[in-house]
């Protein structure tokens, strides 16, 4: 095999290693990766970083004070609107919902407009099997102030 082919194969193999650290539990693998929230889930305007709702282990930004009430009333709906737009909310999570250790922000499962961070690659597989369960654990930890 010539050097160019070996180099291309090596680059492809190295690039493939990083892809295993992110998993989408609610969409097929071919779906483009979500981006951090840029738009208000209610009105679609540019977010104001001083206006937000902390709920379900997430920080959901809005564009104006009028959008706070509907997001507070139904944060799950706001997160799903973000997911439909290819965005995810900022996480307030600090510990892995599987093992309880410190999260690695490079390791997560995307689920309905949020990221569920874990401590190690083995925990990704666990979360993928029941993402709703682990999303609920993250939300419960946030509600207790343990994040």
Image (cartoon, grey):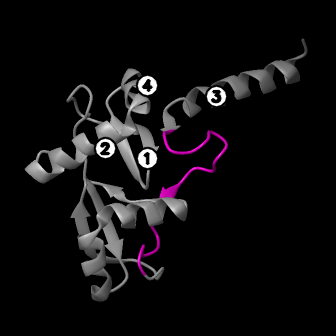
Residue that label 4 marks: 125
- Asked if disc 1 and disc 2 are in contact, CB closer than 8 Å, the reply is yes
- What is the crowding at mark 2: few (fewer than 14 residues within 10 Å), some, or many (at least 20)? many
Magenta stretch: give its range.
24-42
Separation of residues labelled 4 and 1 (CA atoms): 13 Å
Question: Can the viewer see residue 39 in this picture?
Answer: yes
Name which residue lies at 64% across and 31% down: 15
Name which residue lies at 68% across and 23% down: 13
Residue that label 1 marks: 111
**With 4 as the anchor, is 100 left or right in this view?**
left
Q: Position of residue 108 (x, y in %)?
A: 41, 38
- Asked if disc 4 and disc 3 are in contact, CB closer than 8 Å, the reply is no
Q: Disc 2 on helix, strand or loop?
A: helix
Residue that label 3 marks: 16
Name which residue lies at 50% across and 44% down: 26
26 and 87: which is toward the camera: 26
Q: Disc 1 on helix, strand or loop?
A: strand
Separation of residues labelled 4 and 3 (CA atoms): 17 Å
98 and 93: which is toward the camera: 98
The first of marks 4 and 1 along the sequence is 1
- Looking at the rendered structure, the number of numbered marks drawn on it comes to 4
Q: Position of residue 132 (x, y in %)?
A: 35, 41
Name which residue lies at 30% across and 37% down: 133
């Amino acid at each position: 095999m010539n050097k160019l082919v070996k180099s291309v194969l090596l680059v492809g193999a190295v690039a493939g290693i990083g892809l295993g650290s992110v998993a989408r539990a609610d969409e097929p693998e071919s779906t483009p990766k979500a981006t951090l929230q840029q738009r208000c889930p209610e009105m679609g305007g540019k977010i104001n970083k001083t206006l937000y709702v902390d709920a379900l282990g997430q920080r959901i930004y809005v564009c104006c004070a009028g959008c706070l009430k509907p997001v507070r009333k139904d944060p799950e709906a706001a997160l799903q609107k973000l997911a439909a737009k290819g965005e995810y909310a900022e996480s307030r999570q600090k510990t892995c919902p599987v093992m309880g250790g410190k999260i690695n922000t490079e390791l997560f499962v995307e689920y309905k407009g949020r990221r569920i961070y874990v401590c190690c690659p083995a925990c990704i597989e666990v979360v993928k099997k029941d993402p709703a369960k682990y999303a609920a654990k993250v939300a419960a930890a946030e509600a207790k102030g343990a994040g």
